[in-house]
Image (cartoon, rainbow, N blue to C red):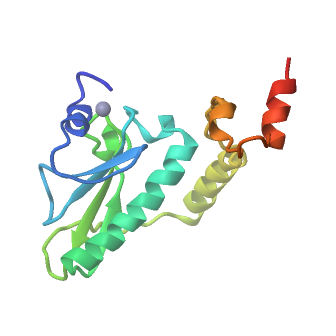
């Protein structure tokens, strides 16, 4: 948790929470663009998407899809926009990575449209090469570290009838 981050505080306060699991939290936006505007965030504080571990990215986008489905069903909307403002230039106004899930209704007046730009053939092939070259490195993904197996007191867990030792119990005793 980052003490200066209002979203970390929001997660901690537990207010307006619509979904939570061990990795992510979804809350209602307090500056909504539409009725039911939800923000979905990792519980850990990561300023930009690049810093979020791959397994969290995996998880958060899956949950985003499920929350979008929930919005369709619960709010009877006709669409959703899933939006990530990644970086200040992209309109990111908080230092906590998040996905906006915006329920949409026909004619709701929310404008996320843009005027298409005209790129020349040369620009198109240049940008294609620039991106293709860099995208070659995609494919290495960080895996979630699994917690070490907890060793419990085996004897307690083994049930054995009086006078009858279980195989496991004998095995446990044999260990020096
Ligand atoms: Zn935060």
Give the image location of residue 157, x and y in percent: 64, 39
Give the residue displayed 79% in from the left and 43% down from the top: 164
Q: Nearer the viewer, residue 111 or 55?
A: 55
- Residue depicted at 49% across the width and 52% down the height: 59
Q: From where the camera sits, is residue 117 visible?
A: no
Residue 31 or residue 44, whichever sits in front:
44
In this picture, residue 44 sits left or right of residue 4: right
**Residue 155 percent across, percent down from the top left:** 68, 32
Q: Is residue 88 above or below residue 37?
A: above
Answer with the quadrant where ligand 1 appears in the image: top left
Looking at this view, name the residue that lies furthest to the front. Answer: 163
Q: Is residue 12 above or below residue 174?
A: below
Q: Residue furthest top?
A: 176
- For the question of whether residue 166 can be seen, the reply is yes
Q: Nearer the viewer, residue 67 or 134?
A: 67
How many numbered circles does the render carry?
0
Q: Quadrant of residue 111?
A: bottom left
170 vs 38: above or below: above
Question: Quick check: 79 left or right of 170?
Answer: left
Residue at 31%, 71% in the rendered image: 70
Which quadrant of the figure contains the C terminus? Answer: top right
What residue do we see at 35% from left, 73% from top? Answer: 69
Where in the figure is residue 35, as x and y percent of width and height?
13, 66
Q: Quadrant of the N terminus?
A: top left
* 152, above or below 76, in the image: above
Q: Position of residue 21 (x, y in %)?
A: 39, 49
Q: Is residue 142 left or right of residue 94?
A: right
């Amino acid at each position: 948790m980052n003490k200066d981050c209002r979203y970390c505080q929001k997660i901690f306060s537990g207010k307006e929470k619509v979904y939570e699991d061990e990795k992510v939290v979804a809350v209602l936006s307090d500056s909504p663009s539409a009725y039911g505007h939800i923000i979905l965030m990792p519980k850990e504080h990561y300023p930009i998407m690049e810093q979020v571990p791959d397994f969290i990215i995996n998880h958060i986008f899956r949950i985003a899809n499920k929350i979008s489905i929930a919005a369709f069903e619960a709010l009877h909307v006709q669409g959703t926009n899933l939006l990530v403002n990644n970086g200040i230039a992209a309109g990111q106004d908080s230092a906590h990575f998040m996905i906006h899930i915006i329920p949409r209704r026909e004619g709701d007046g929310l404008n996320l449209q843009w005027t298409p730009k005209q790129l020349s053939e040369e620009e198109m092939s240049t940008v294609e090469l620039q991106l293709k070259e860099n995208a070659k490195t995609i494919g290495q993904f960080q895996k979630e570290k699994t917690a070490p197996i907890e060793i419990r007191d085996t004897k307690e867990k083994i049930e054995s009838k009086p006078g009858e030792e279980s195989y496991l119990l004998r095995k446990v005793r044999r260990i020096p």
